[in-house]
């Protein structure tokens, strides 16, 4: 598909936007395709973007979709460039070391339960009491818990009214 001057200007602006999200962009190749009209699928535009960078390239391929709004090349281009931007942002975050490390669950024992209010406390190996509510319990029922049960848990980032709070609690099999 030969793009109009308007589409070419839009693509140039989108490429400039990508350069803001990832410094070091070497080249950007964009291919627009419009297959012959199909009575069932309409006339969707396929967009393929290949961004050359140091390291492996970022490739976004938005093929011909069943989506009626991809009959409009502006929408197909917007969606493809949004996907490319997200990939470039992810790569930039990884390079800066900003990728969130997932916390590993710790092991502790249940030391106090309040069945009427459906919460309890875990006692960690360091002697810290950690509050948990039944909604934090994964893969088990609150009524099955017993004092002394070994559980894995992850402490929530924010401390609650009852002190440190577990975001997830799971019985150790």
Image: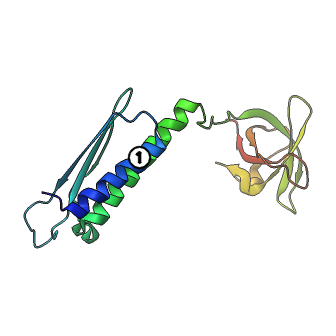
Q: Position of residue 30 (x, y in %)?
A: 24, 47
Q: In which quarter of the image is residue 101?
A: top right
Q: In this view, does 38 lie to the left or right of 75?
A: left
Front residue of 7 and 89:
7
Q: Is residue 87 left or right of residue 149?
A: left
Q: Mark 1: which secondary structure?
A: helix
Quadrant that contains the C terminus: top right
Front residue of 97 and 164:
97
In the picture of the structure, the residue carrying the numbered disc 1 is 18
At horizontal 71% and vertical 53% (from top left) the residue drawn is 141
Q: Position of residue 113 (x, y in %)?
A: 88, 51
Q: In this view, does 81 lie to the left or right of 29?
A: right
Quadrant that contains the N terminus: bottom left
Q: In this view, does 149 lie to the left or right of 59?
A: right
At horizontal 82% and vertical 48% (from top left) the residue drawn is 165
Colour scheme of the picture: rainbow
């Amino acid at each position: 598909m030969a793009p109009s001057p308007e589409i070419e200007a839009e693509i140039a602006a989108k490429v400039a936007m990508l350069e803001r999200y990832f410094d070091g962009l070497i080249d950007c190749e964009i291919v627009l395709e419009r297959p012959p009209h199909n009575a069932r699928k309409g006339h969707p535009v396929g967009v393929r973007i290949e961004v050359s960078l140091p390291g492996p390239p970022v490739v976004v391929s938005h093929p011909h979709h069943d989506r009626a709004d991809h009959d409009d090349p502006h929408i197909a281009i917007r969606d493809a460039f949004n996907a490319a931007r997200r990939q470039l942002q992810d790569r930039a975050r990884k390079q800066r070391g900003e990728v969130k490390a997932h916390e590993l669950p710790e092991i502790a024992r249940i030391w106090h339960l309040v069945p009427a209010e459906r919460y309890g406390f875990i006692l960690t190996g360091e002697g810290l009491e950690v509050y948990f509510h039944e909604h934090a319990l994964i893969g088990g029922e609150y009524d099955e818990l017993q004092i002394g049960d070994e559980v894995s848990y992850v402490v929530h980032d924010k401390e609650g009214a009852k002190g440190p709070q577990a975001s997830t609690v799971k019985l150790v099999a």
